[in-house]
Every structure is written in structure tokens, then in C-alpha cells.
Image: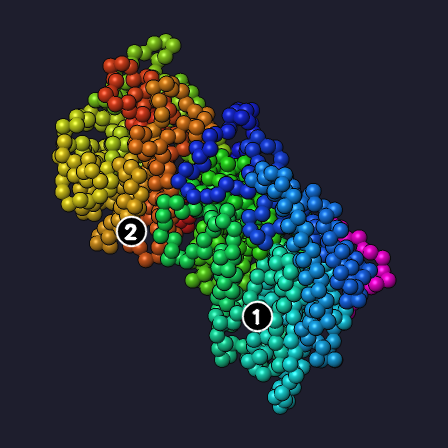
Amino acid sequence: MPADPPTEHETPHRSSSDPPCESWSCPTGYCHRSNTKRAPPLNPPPAPCTTSILRNGTGYTKNHPNDNDASLSRGRKRFSPSSSSRNVRSSQSAMERASKFLSTVFEGSEETWTGISSYHQRKSTKGHRSTLTLLTLLSLAGAACFFLQSNILDRNGPNDGDDHDATRKLKRLSPQDHPDDPPRSDFLDDFDQRRRRAADLPDGTIFEEPAHTRMCRVLLPRLDARDAGSSSFPEAIFTESEYVCRDPDAPYTSVMNMMAAQLLGAAAEKMGLGVKYTHRCAKWEKFCSGNMTTIQFHLPDPISMQSYAFQEGCVDAAALRRICQNSLDAGTNNPELILFPNSYLDSSSYTCNMQCYFLQVLPWIRTNLRIVATEWLNTVETRALTFWLRNAEEFSHREKDDMEVSVVSLSCANDGCNMSHESCECIFEPLPNWVYAMHIPRSSTNVAIVVAPTCAKFGVGCTLHAQELYHFFRRLYPRADITYNVITSTSSWYMRMITADHLVCPPGNGCVLPAIARDAYTYVYEKTSPTIQTWLTCIPNDYLARLTLPVFPALYGDGDCRHLRARMGSWTSDLSLAPSLQYGSAVDGYLGCADANFVSSAEEPYRLPTTYRWDETVWPSCPLNVLSTADLCTAMDRLGLGRILFVGDHTSMTQAVSLASMMGQGADISLDPNVVPNFSKTITCTGTTIGSFELTFIRNDRLEEPGTTPSPGNPNCGQSNQQFCYPWSTNFAQYSKKQLLIVNTGYHWGNDWQGYITNFQNFVGRIDDSAAGFALRTNDVIMFRTSIPGHKECHLHNGVYAHYGEYCPRIVNGAFWHWWGELPPYNDYAIRIINEWNLLNTAKSGPNIELLDPWYMTILRPDGHLSGSDAGPSCKLQTEECMLYSLPGPVDWWNHLLVSQLKDIVLHKESDSPMVAWR
């Protein structure tokens, strides 16, 4: 049974404990990643203290040449002839219409300029005049070109198949569009303004059905004639209706309409029925404006059939007749009845009748969408080059400056806008915040919240949810660039979803087609009850390897707290808890110096760094509890683990000494630099099956195996041969029991990015090789602990930071600061590789790698360092040490986190819940 979802505290935009607005501001380059190449955003995101975000017509960003800001999308009405002249526009001169167009264009010029970036706003007055002059000339030329072209197309447009078949001519003029009727009032005001309702054919015909329906009406009698012996048919060319081409509100249905018509046309042409299809969507906008805002405009014309191989028996005359007849009988103009006629889940048997037809259609749709995405990437503006159309095998080829873009796409759960746009119904069903935290990795450099226009306008709670997500993500991903946009261009919306690294979608068909075109990290939530895209339940297994279709409402699995814990919270002073945070005896050497010299008093009974507890402020049902020997022993026993093996540098040794001390085994651990630092302790577990387990530390600063063994004073690895790399992989691979391996590397790589990348991949390879050579290694638990930067001038601090905003101005980097600024990007790279290992590598022998991530809670602890204010003069080191901590202190909470996560892993494994991967 799934566990109860975590309790989420409401996260208002600001709480009473939040600092004033100005304290959230940080120097340029500090609050966000300093190691990613990106251009400054055209429109800066709202400030954290903003209580409302511009929506429904303002605040749109233009991140792509085809994106329209609010003023441009509203100005689309300037292309629209009045409703009383729609059917006589061929008699209106091009120059008159151009003049009318320009007069309306310049009525809104002030509004049009509101979306221009601050960079352009800094231009000189002379530059403004030059720009306006240029825009005037371009508008004149564009308007004349457009209307001239539209006249030509009206007179000499493509002949639709209905013109060649008088018995089935569809010339149904809508009563609302009769020239004598008064102008209609449409409740879709701003949406109606960005459409024009022109005739689809020069004779005034308006197509009120998509092309595939009209084609089926022609194909059925031709199939009958073919069966009667006819072999020659007049050519009938079908084009798509304007509604389908320009519909900005239902891209899923529109694209599927076009795909269905192209498939019918290709099948009919193969059978010699004389019926062809070319969507000709570009005739509505392409030739002059170049402003193709819907995804429909970007599909190839004709749509490519190269990836669709007609197989005998898949689409023959009988199949074509059955498909068309069933589609017409349904009377719904549903393109899925053409594309997926036999591929719905049988609710009685829960089986799918996929057949070859279904298996051909799906890759064909995917290929065409990826063609469009590739072309989009070749023309996208520089500031949007955070997107990359990755193939599955390319995910592991990462560089230091790679962006990692995650997109949350909010759309209606239904395609509720009908073809004539006379009504629009949008049901919006949001996901809880913990779902996004599960799927969006903490290594993301950019998190974009994109909202479909119909969802923003008609979806109750859609815009509010997007606003709340924006502020929530600002806290959950403090180093990432968070953006929130209402996308007025469905082409840009689709392309962002296809080319992002990670995509998360609440229920809705807006994400379905982009999800099919992606290769990995795709989560599209679906209801278990039948929906418009029920064919998704029959997706072949090779597609399920690329995308995940979790059920909605989202199910919280046992052990999933480990994905959420320690990511958002704060430190609170708690003197009542402090006694349980002390060791039985002080640690030897410099790690225990501050504690050994501390003199208790009534005012300060314990060292201040040992008096804080970590509180989960967003998910309190996933608490970080203080560990006990019994808790750790129980977890080790239930997992059958015989050893905890720490491998890493001095920080890993500090964690190992901390855990041993909390287990009462801190004595006789030498910190003398003239002694080999490795050690092993036995922890007795009374009343358990395992009886005891080993706690072992092996120092290896870079997780390397240089082939030599160092000795005190004689390092053996690193660029300058100044690090210590004691052999560890053989010890790990040949251990006779299951074990918990906890590793870390990063501090000793400086700015050697290429070395770190190569070595981390080698580490993952060693885990796989060990499992391939010894089957017991497949049952090990592997954890990678993130690296924690030090704190500048730690001797000045005797308290904690309240939030990331207090820490970020103090971030430092460079050789003098031991390249601390490189550690977060190193962590990001490790998290990316771990996620790819866990989710994409289907041929691995080794176990999944879990993440132990105390980064956020530790950067809020500038106190308690070896050179901290509590250390005292007798503990002063030759060189200020603001990275390593005294014991007991903040590092103890790494082990509290370790045991809490280990208990969740027990629940996860015992319930056999699906692996989501550490984020």
C-alpha cells in the first residue's frame, strides 16, 4: 500500500520570519551559479517579495522569435477583417486593408513597447527614433506583402478535394458569418482577437471539420468504386482548415488532426484513390509576417512519411474503410480514431490490441516532432540556448558549463475549446509540491514554469499554482534560475517541452505529444479513468523507457521521504535537546580540541554549535531525527549489512569519527599526521540477527587507484602529488558480506574539471565492475555524499544563517579559498551521473546509487569550524581552517541524516516501491 504523502506546510510568498525584501538581494554572480554560461534574462523574474505576478496579458517573455508578448498577441486583431466583410474580402483592395491595418498597429504602439527589455530601454532617444522608423517601414512592407499574398492565395489557392466531388461539396457558411448579420460578441475576447475568421476557399467556403473527416467522406465512395472495378480517380487535394492551423488553444488535437489527415492521404495515394493531403497552414501567416505562433505551422508540409513504412495488412482497403467508417459514425471528428483505432486498453481484460498499425504511427509522430525541434534549435535566439535536443546516449556527455533545464508545463486536463471557439472549458488539476521535488533534480540550473494560455485564462487556480510554484522553487532550488511564463506561442511551448532535460506535467494532453518526442526524464501524470489519450496505456515498452506515466492523484511511496528531507528547513536553538547531542568523551586531537577546552557555565551549559536542531519547515512529516545506536543497528539488520565503509578525504574521516563517537567507539582513533589515518571499529548490535557491524574508514582524497600505497608524509596522487589515495576498491569488491559504502570526492580537485569528470565516471565503472565480478555486490547500498564549501571568516560567526539569502553574498572561490566555489558544480555533475546511472542505464550490473546530501543544511552553519569563535586560543591552527568542523558539531547531523535516509531505504526495499532516483 502506498504511504501517506508528506504533510506540506503552506508556503506563502513571504512569512513573518522572512527577511525584508532588500536582504534577499545578492551581488551579481553570487546567488546563482557562477559556472554556467548564460545570457542575462530579457525580462527579470519577479522579486521574492512580490505577492502577485503579472498574468493574463502582461508579464509575457519573448524567449523565441515566434513567441508573442501580450501586446503583440492582442494586436493580432489588426489582421482581422470585420465579421461583416469576411466573405467578401477578395473584393477589398490590398492597399485599403493595409492602410486599415497600419492605423490599428500604431494605435497600440505604446503598449507594444512595454515588453521590450531593459537593455533596449537604455538605448538613446536617437536609437528609439531609428528603431521606430525601421519598424514603420517594415510594417508597411509586411502589410502590403501579406495582403497581396492573401489576395493571390484567395484567387489561386489550392483546390480542395471537395471541389472535385460535387456530390460531397461542403459549402456551409456559418449563420454568424453571414454578411448581413451584426457583428457577434464573443466571450473569448482577447483570444478571439488573435484569430481571423476568413474563408478557407476563394468561393467563401469555411471548413468546419478537420481535413481527415472531409477526406473520409470522399474516400468511402471511392473505395466502393475501387471494389466495383474502377482504377482511375480524379485528383482531390485536401488542405487543412484555418481553425486547425491557427488554433492556439488545443495544439494536441490540432496536431493529431493533421497527422490523421496526412496518414489518410498517404494511404489513399498508395492505393491509387487520387486523394492527397497538404496542410498548407503556412498560407495563413508565413509568407509575410513569419510569425508562426502555433506548432501546426512548423510541421513539414507535406508531413514527412519517411519513418512510416506501410506493411501489408496494416493499412489496406479494408482497414481504411473500417477506420473511416468508424470515425464518421462516431461523429466527433476525433483524430485518434484514425491514428489509433485498435489500440485502447480493454477495461475487461486489461490488454491492448496494438497491432502493426499502432506501432508504425507512434514513431512516425515522434520523428516529425523531433524534426521540428531540431529546426527550432537552429533558429532559436542566443538567450534561449539552454535547450538541447539530447538523444538517450548523449545524456552522460556533460561538460562543466552545461545547462540542465527542467520544465514544468501547466495546461488544461482536457481539450475543452471546441473547433469554432464558441465555448471553452478548462479543468486544471495541480500536483502537490512534493511531486515536483521528486522529479526535478537539485542539479538543475534552470527551472521554467510554462503555462498554456487557455490554462491561464480559464483554468481555475492555474495561474495561482504557477505563482506559488515560482516562489516555492526559488527556495527549493536556490542556485537555479527560476522563470515563470505564460506561453502565447504553442510552437515555443512544445519546443521547450521537447528540448528540456526534464519535463514534469500535471494531467492534461498538452504534454502528451512532446513527451512522445523526448528521450528521458519525462513524467506525465495520467488519471486511471479513461481520458482523451487512453492510447497512452498501450504504449510499447521501448517508449516507457523514455517516459513515465504515473497515476493521478500522485501516490506517495514508502521511503520517498529520502528525496525530500534536508532540502528545505532551518536551524533552531534547542537546549533541551543539547544533552543528547554530546559525546561520552571528547574526540582526540584537533577535531575535539574545542570540546575539550570548553568550560560549562549556567549561561552556556554546552558549546553553542552543539545546541541546534534541524527543523523541516515544508515537509514536517519527513523529520530529521537524532540517531541512536538501536536505530542504526535495526536498519543495518533489516538490510543485512555487515559493514559501513567510508571512503574519502578529511571530511569523510570527520564524518566517520563522528559516527564512531556517537556509537561510543571514538577512543583510540589517532589524528596524528604521522600515523596512517585508516581505522575500523566494531559496533555491537544487541538483539539483532547480524550481532554487530564494522565501521571502517579508508582515506582516498580523489577516489583514485594510482597503483601505489602512500604513507604518512608521502602522498601518492593528485596533480601535484600532494594527496593521499590509499587503495580501497579491492577491499570493497572482495568484502564477504553486504555493505553500506559512503563515498565523497571534490575538495581535492581544485578547478581540474576534466579530471573530476573522468574520475567520477571511473568510480561508477568500478561499482559496476565489482558487481559484475561478485554477485553479492549487487545487493550493497551505495551512497555519494555531496561536498560542502567552507565559510569565509568563520571566526567571526557564533550563530547560524536563517536562509540561503544570508549565505550567498559570502560565497568565495579561487585558489586562496581552496576552490570552494567549484564544489556545488561538482555536486551537480555527480547528481546528473547518478540519475543517469539509476534511470537510464538498463544494462548495469551494480546497484542504484543513493544520494546523501547535507549541502543545504550545512551551508547555513558558519559556526563550529576548527577556527571558529568557540575553538579558543589554545586550539588555534597555523592556517585558518574554515572548512572542517569541530566535533561534536554540525557534522553530527550528516550522520543523523544518514540514519534517517537508511531507514527510508529499508522501507523502500521492503515495499518494493519503484525507484525514482535521488534528486
Q: x, y (%) of residue 42?
A: 55, 42
Query: In the image, 584: left or right of 674?
Result: right
Image quadrant assignment for residue 903: top left
Residue occupying the point 47% across, 48% down? 386
Say whether disc 1 or disc 2 marks the residue closer to the N-terminus.
1
Residue 696 shown in magenta: no
Q: Give the label, 1 or 2, closer to the camera.
A: 1
Residue 29 left/right relative to 97 = left
Residue 302 badge? 1
- Tell me the residue at 46%/33% (across/down): 28
- The kind of secondary structure element at disc 1 is loop
Residue 719 image offset from top left, x and y in percent: 22, 40
Residue 800 seen by the camera = yes
Q: Is residue 211 left or right of residue 119?
A: right
Task: Assign a secondary structure to mark 2.
Answer: loop
Separation of marks 1 and 2 at Cα, in angstroms: 47 Å
Residue 900 image position (x, y, % from top left): 37, 35
Report the coloring of the rendering.
rainbow
Q: Provide residue 383's location: percent of width, then percent of height.
A: 50, 47
Does 182 appear in magenta? yes
Q: Which mark is residue 846?
A: 2
Q: Nearer the viewer, residue 36 or 701?
A: 36
The disc at residue 856 is: none
**Crowding at mark 1 (Cα within 10 Å: few <14, some 14-19, many 20+):** few
Examine the residues drawn in magenta and state their main secondary structure. loop
Crowding at mark 2 (Cα within 10 Å: few <14, some 14-19, many 20+) = many
Instruction: Tell me where the magenta segment starts and ends, as one range.
Output: 172-190
Residue 341 seen by the camera: no
- The three-letter code of the residue at mark 2 reads Gly
Nearer to me, 211 or 131: 131
Q: Residue at x 45, y 61 (%)?
A: 543
